[in-house]
Amino acid sequence: MNRREAAERISLLLGGTLSVELTAGLMGQVIHPGPNVAVSVAQQALLAEVADVIIPTTDTPGAKAAGAEQFIIRVMRDCYPLQEQEAFYAGLAKLEADSQSAHGKAFADLESNAKIQLVQQTAEMNRAFFKRLKELTVTGYFTSEIGATRALAYLPVPGRFAGDVPMEKGQKTWAL
Amino acid sequence: MATLSIQSKQERTYDAIVVGSGVSGGWAAKELTEKGLRVLMLERGRQLDHITGYEYAMKAPWETKYNGRLTTEQIESHPKLSRDYPYNEMTEKYWFNDSDSLYKEVQRFDWYRPNIVGGKSIMWGRQSYRWSDLDFEANLKDGIAVDWPIRYADIAPWYSYVEKHAGISGEKLGLPQLPDGEFLPPMEMYYVEKEVRQRLEKAFPGRHMTIGRVANLSKAAEAQSGIGRGPCMYRNRCAYGCPFGAYFSTQSCTLPPAAKTGRLTLRPDSIVTEIVLDDPSQRATGVRVRDAVTMEDREYFAKILFVCASAISSTALLMNSISSRFPNGLGNDSGQLGRNLMDHHFRVGASGVWEGGLDRYYYGRRANGIYVPRYQNIGSDKRDYLRGFGYQGGASREGWQRNVAELAFGEDFKTELTKPGRWTMGLGGFGETLPYEDNRMDLDQNTRDKWGLPVVVFDAGLRDNEKKMRLDMANDAQEMLEASGLKNVTPYDKESHLGMAIHEMGTARMGRDPKTSVLNAHNQVHAVPNVFLTDGACMTSSACVNPSLTYMALTARAADFAVAELKKLNL
């Protein structure tokens, strides 16, 4: 018996009451998870810019190089209800609008100091949005390949354990 | 319903049937096959191949989608499981879909059902401790529930037997309330744990702190390397399945020797719906099985049954096995089936910050913590409640996840997070829950699940004894951490609902008298001697000690007894 037959058989046993979604699930198809905010290419680019102010390039690459915005977009889309997605992207839109009204320029086109100033202002004025953005940026960055392997000390298979060793100079936080 | 391939009754007959493939079922299969029996192991979950089936075991964090978060869709489809952390992005495929069999809660009960071969032996916490006569004598001394029909001396050799094969690392302490075992070398403590241990044991004579006794191989002895297991790589990814076979699971430890005998047949996707009873002989003849995928029904036959489906599922199976002899569930002459439901209560303790030690760090990720054995109501330490609690805990050094200044961002913020933070340490209590007759589970015959089976209803909660104990669990932790030099020590009680510790026990208890218990001293159903039940359902009290090692020992002991009885033609 193949998978389709099995699904149909279960459906029959349950009186043919299986929803289209459940049948699709049994058949291994992807079920659309519900309404989402559609994120434009411009919004994605803007997110990358803002994330890169939160975690900038220093002696190691920053959030933009690590692609943290992709993690943020994915988590917002799949793990938050529509209302919270809308609030988040409204916060992002506000930041861009503030840039236009204060500087007559897109956030992406601002000088570094102006970017920092605007993010600082957002942190104070729109705290909920900032905290969510910061949390997702930090997680997205330090769990990215660049963040974990370059900004932190990445050791996937230690092979042994020592609970009490002197800390080396310049020791970075373990990534895992 | 017609079956697609009808096997003859002879082809569906075995010497023994084992229901479930978790910690207990795995041991039953190993012991029975090694003693020469042809065994059919039935598992309701899907096949999970050792090593190749562990999808997330070797994935880097950037290869996950959400770094562990659940999606809104998963929260909707798993309304019970999504309430706590064990169900997450990396382990989601190991767990049962709540929606397929949505159990009912008169009082909240967190029921963690796996959906894989290996059961919870794949995702378990691996803490492995012996129980003692402090536990086995407790009911008798307190005049509570019924007396355990066994004592430590009955089970001690079986603890040794299973420890040698499973491989438990730990430190000997010589304490009567937490007997030593056959240990592999102990894992090392962190710098702060060593400091705290010294201070704690000095400030509180009679209290001890030791490294966790854990079913991870600190060293692979011949018993382990001989079946393809390697030592722990200190990755701390155990719950995803270990590609090195370095911790005890059915796949790493009990299935390989069982399979090697050539006498094991494992059938995944096989839901045992009923135990079939032969009325005149008062023996079970076998089981009815519904295929979880195709819904085909089929019957299998055997001389003996080992019911190891997990505490709740084993009892549900007995309850669903109705006959004219047992109208209230198989073996339920006592009316105790489904009663005395227990779990450890926890999520209460304290944590604090260690000032200093910033020049000390560690190498590797130890999938283990420290343990403070029970000290309450022992000797002169008297409390205003019965029994007691132990602590699990540990120190750690804050990493990038730590919360630095709320509104900080930018270069300095990033640089700060890439350096190790402060040392912190916590103690979390695990407390004994008394066996209350009306803490119970039942079946709702009017509500059927996806497979047409009645759903489980829970009505059990913590009582005064546990609530009083919780005050001490927080206070003592605070007191000990403060006396040991930690600062900013904060007690917490995050509420514990039964089931959350995933140490569910009771509902088919062992006892001396068939009028007041379901199982005898050999885990044999009093009235149906060829049915054995050796998982958490059999427990007569809960102790405060993690129970899995005791299930292993009881199962090996019962299997030995069952085969001896078979040879004597007593079954």
Image: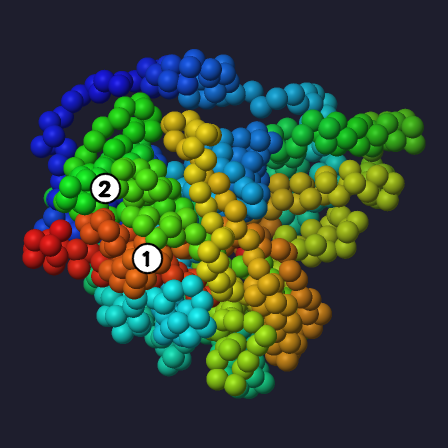
On the image, the x and y values in percent for residue B527 come to 24, 51
Q: Residues within 10 Å of mark 1 (few under 14, many from 20)?
A: few
On the image, the x and y values in percent for residue B375 come to 50, 77
On the image, the x and y values in percent for residue B407 come to 79, 49
Q: Are discs 2 and 1 less than 8 Å apart at CB? A: no
Q: Residues within 10 Å of mark 2 (few under 14, many from 20)?
A: many
> Which picture quadrant has residue B328?
top left
Left or right of A3, for residue B462: right
Instruction: Name which residue lies at 14% across and 33% down.
Output: B12
Q: Which mark is residue B515?
A: 1
Instruction: Determine the chain carrying the residue at label 2.
Output: B
Q: Secondary structure at mark 1?
A: loop
Q: Would you name the residue on which mark 2 appears?
A: B41
Relative height, residue B387 to residue B47 (above, below): below
Amino acid tagged 1: Lys
Which of the colour schemes (rainbow, by chain, secondary structure, one colour) is used?
Answer: rainbow
Q: Secondary structure at mark 2?
A: strand
Relative height, residue B280 to residue B503 (above, below): above
